[in-house]
Image: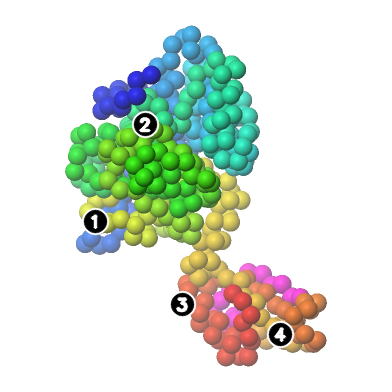
Amino acid sequence: MDTTVTLGMVLEARERLKKVVRRTDLVPYRVLGVPGKNEIFIKTENLQHTGAFKLRGAYNKIAQLTEEERAHGVIASSAGNHAQGVALAASMFGVKATIVMPEGAPLAKIAATRAYGAEVVLSGLVYDDAYQKAMELQQETGAVFVHPFNDPQVIAGQGSLGLEIMDDEPDIGTVVVPIGGGGLISGIAVAIKSLWPNVKIIGVQAAGAPSMQQSLREGHPITLSSAHTIADGIAVKTPGDLTYELCQKYVDEVVTVDEDEICNAILTLLEKCKIVAEGAGAVSVAALLHNKFKAEGKIACLVSGGNIDVTTLQRILDKGLMKAGRLAQVCTLIEDRPGRLHRLLAVVSDSGANVVSIRHDRTNMESGIGMAMLELTLETHNQQHLDQVLATMEQNGYRIISH
């Protein structure tokens, strides 16, 4: 297999994809920028068919298979988004698709993949485990393996995103891209650096899965001992050898963001930009919000996907609100007598906080005789407001045990 990726391949992929993928918008968001310093644009690939960019590479790959290859079907391994891209692309050509996904893949992604007509096999805990199982099945069936990132045609398909960004806003100076295995940023970097060499390409990984960043530091692809992050779409322990070479050649910098920063970005995108982003899709904005790179001029942040499980989204939003001081669990003691709870709630109410829930426990061994442990979940405006609420409680004689 040819292991080069050229601008010509990306241009061909763009033509091949014109009637298949949605040309997603590049939207300016002043709320994310700093006046006089930068201007921020969001490439809304979360609105792509299947909810992520993966259809681009999957379709470009399957479109170039021979009839004989298609007759054997295709097989892929994926944490979720590549699964849906391959499933949809295969259905367009009437090709049987088998997808191996980690056992912990979000239920919404598993259901969506099946809905596109693919057979789903669950195996392992992370992407790399699913990959090993997929390779075993490929040997048994003779199906064509569609790699999620380490394939020239897949990379070329993803590169069409880079052309769209620069066509829509030629003055962009920095493009910020999530990295898992490196296929997305490799394609974008090849496209942009070939035509606009002065544009900076910044890659972003989750701090719990920094495989590409560490590989670039070591000078060769490495394998992490583990990959744990809420950004499941980029939880890859081993980057591709091809994507490593392309990142080494074209990518200017790779940074990482931690779990709290990812949660904050998801919350910010939802609340201020009205954009639903999964963890992997939000890391580009997390890097911007938390000053991980020099953010000057016109910057395009790629939100690569929006396939987030609703229950996961709720947990992430709660975590983000707590990090921002807008949601807090406060534990204190009150006398176990009539009217004492009402008195405490009046103090909290007068301070401007909203009580979401109350847990009253008179059996707690630490509370002492005649006392009750009280756990309040409070909504506040920000960290400063929360600090004022806690101070007011203490001024009124309520000892804060934890918050």
Mark 2 sits on what residue? 242
Which residue is nearer to you in this view: 179 or 336?
A: 179
The answer to whether residue 85 is left or right of residue 375 is left
The answer to whether residue 320 is left or right of residue 256 is right
- Cα distance between the residues tagged 2 and 3: 49 Å
- Cα distance between the residues tagged 3 and 1: 29 Å
Mark 1 Cα-neighbour bin, 10 Å: few <14, some 14–19, many ≥20: some
Looking at the picture, the colour scheme in use is rainbow
Which callout, 2 or 3, points to the residue nearer the camera? 2
Q: State whether residue 344 is above or below residue 194.
A: below
Magenta segment: 346-361
- Quarter residue 220 falls in: top left
- Percent across and percent down for residue 311 are 61, 51
* Label 1: element kind: loop
Q: Earlier in the sequence, mark 3 or mark 1?
A: 1
Q: Are marks 3 and 1 in contact (CB under 8 Å)?
A: no
Residue 334: which numbered mark, if any? Answer: 4
Mark 3 Cα-neighbour bin, 10 Å: few <14, some 14–19, many ≥20: few
Mark 3 sits on what residue? 384
